[in-house]
Amino acid sequence: MSNPQQLRYSKEHEWLSPAEDGVATVGITEFAANALGDVVFAQLPEVGSTVAAGETCGELESTKSVSDLYSPVSGEVTEINQDVVDDPSLVNSEPFEGGWLFKVRIAEEPADLMSADEYAAQNAG
Amino acid sequence: MSSSASHPLRHTALDALHRSLGATMTDFAGWDMPLRYGSERDEHVAVRTRAGLFDLSHMGEIAVTGPEAAALLNHALVGDIASVGVGRARYTMICREDGGILDDLIVYRLAETEYLVVANASNAQVVLDALTERAAGFDAEVRDDRDAYALLAVQGPASPAILQSLTDADLAGLKYYAGLPGTVAGVQALIARTGYTGEDGFELFVAPADAEKLWQALTDAGADAGLIPCGLSCRDTLRLEAGMPLYGHELTTSLTPFDAGLGRVVKFGKEGDFVGREALRRAAERAAENPPRVLVGLVAEGRRVPRAGYPVVAGGEVIGEVTSGAPSPTLGKPIAMAYVDAAHAAPGAEGVGVDIRGSHEPYEVVALPFYKRQK
């Protein structure tokens, strides 16, 4: 499994796209999606709500478990992926593309986001 | 999950094969077992509509043989095992003296004086110890046969045709809960028409050395019919939809068969005394006069999934507890089994919900099972 080089990664297995006009896209990694198994329900943060880096902002339910969704950055949610709400399996089939979760206007980002290589090293360890 | 932290995980005869298939493995009762090979939902659907192939070699086989094998099992278990015909099988339970369920079992009568008892992996040692202790005074032998067998299951509507293509055995004449010795793909097997999925299907007990050959033959024979390898994750959602209890969830030592709604497995009329008789008689009366909590089905109106241990609520009060819960691929909604107070146990009972991490989600009370195959 390969993690796209242009993205950055949190230790909770979220990815963050490069910001455009201050807005970045957030999803979970393929590693995380595989660990969860089939995602059946995604509770995403509300548009307009404020999320904080490293804090829970939603839930992902799979057959076997429920996992908290963390935001990799702080900011305001500008959009959620309605396609994932309607069909949560997109998180498994296209974690880095059609399975994105929400967009956030970045107010503050932590210093410890990882590169693709650093993230791969974390998972190998 | 790390129940076996002090012991190395046990591996089935098919371990290398599972890894070559890219299975996600999990620690199940001390065994390293396939959880899923790909999507557990796809595996579930395959069993409901085509066929799935399982490695169930973690199950605990115990042989009971000898002139008084039938009498021993009638004494040790709650069912009438002596009445099981040769070549037939029976779902039954083993209880403590106080009526608490030690395990649920399938017992196959292989010959007049030869039975195969199949216990859950997590309870195999407990069952073996109890049977051994209860055998005192009987002319019968209890033998640990866990290492003698690998167990493969082929389940789903296409499974009879798939299996028939590999054996001369008379599968059409093999009834549900029957078993006969036969040869499958050149491998000696006990062919049993049993399963834990709510579908037609077979369980094949074979020598561990033959397991890989049989797995391969079934995979090849089932390819055109859409058979795929299936892990324990979908086995759990399949049995949940079929309303089948799982030990440690719906069945525990603190419940009697009557508490679990399975009093029918207790046969008071059988010959001879049996362990737990007096306590079970009281439990039967209690269940009839003043039922404690009742096992029911719950179907979600929303999409959040109930999990084992979540409280069932009504009118702000806790009225029960979820024992198993999962998203149901067949119903397309979350479902659960739960023990609830009798006053709220009738199908359609008003105002019942599940406390899902602090939020009370509405649930419909339904009769079990959630799914019954069309015959």
Image: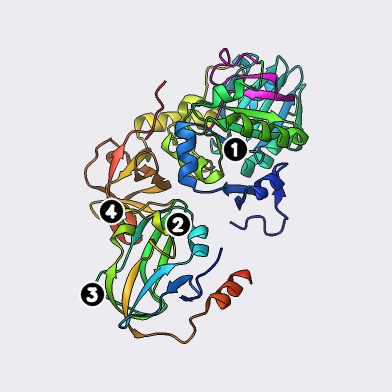
Task: Give me the chain letter of mark 4.
Answer: B
Q: Position of residue B327 (x, y in %)?
A: 39, 47
The C terminus of chain B is located in which quarter? top left
Question: What's the amino acid at mark 2?
Answer: Asn
For label 2, the SS is helix
Q: Which residue is mark 2?
A: A92
Which residue is at 40% across, 85% downward? Answer: A109
Residue B365 horizontal side relative to residue B269, left or right: left
Which amino acid, mark 1?
Phe
Q: Secondary structure at mark 4?
A: strand
Query: What amino acid is labelled 4 in the image?
Result: Glu
Q: Which mark is on residue A48?
A: 3
Looking at the image, residue A31 sits to the left or right of residue B55; the answer is left
Horizontal arrangement in the rendering, residue A37 relative to residue B348 (left or right): right
Give above or below for B12 relative to A75. above
Q: Would residue B273 be visible to someone looking at this image?
A: no
Tell me the magenta residue range. Answer: B169-196
Q: Secondary structure at mark 3?
A: loop
Q: Residue tagged by mark 1?
A: B54
- Camera-nearest label, 2 or 1: 2
